Image: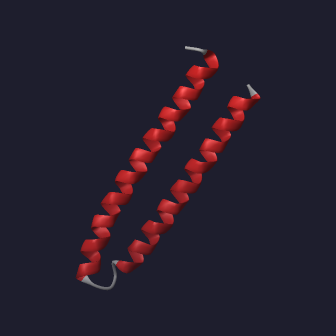
Amino acid sequence: MQNLIKKVRRKIDWAIMDLIATGLVLVFLGILIVWTDFVLRLVIGLFVIVVAYAFFHLAYKIWWLKREVEKYFKL
């Protein structure tokens, strides 16, 4: 049980760090929006890519957690 809790806690910590990194990138891109139209288009494109990455990564983390719980309970 302790091993499962450690694994889940570690994955949650990584998910938090990924969300913080994504937030920092979005703040940086938000600052860049102010300057030019080209940067605005670039930022919007990058924003879409970052959001897509965040969803894929969150889906992977949830899938991993489901797999670990199934392994632990042998479902």
Left or right of 26: which side holds 3?
A: right
The residue depicted at 52 percent of the width and 55 percent of the height is 19
Total numbered circles: 0
Residue 63, image x and y in percent?
Answer: 48, 33
Residue 34 position, x and y percent, is 34, 82
Which residue is outermost to the top?
A: 75
Q: Is residue 16 left or right of residue 28?
A: right
Q: Position of residue 60 (x, y in %)?
A: 46, 40
Quadrant into which the C terminus falls: top right
Q: Check the image and report above or below for 75 versus 9.
A: above
**Is 39 situated above or below 20?**
below
> Looking at the image, which residue sits at the far bottom?
35
Q: Position of residue 24 (x, y in %)?
A: 50, 67
Residue 36 position (above or below residue 51) = below
Residue at far right of view: 2
The residue positioned 46% from the left and 44% from the top of the image is: 58
**The N terminus, quarter of image:** top right
| Nearer to me, 75 or 41 | 75
Q: Compared with residue 59, is residue 17 higher up or lower down, i.e. above or below?
A: below
Give the color scheme: rainbow, by chain, secondary structure or one colour.
secondary structure
**Residue shown at 34% from the left, 63% from the top:** 47
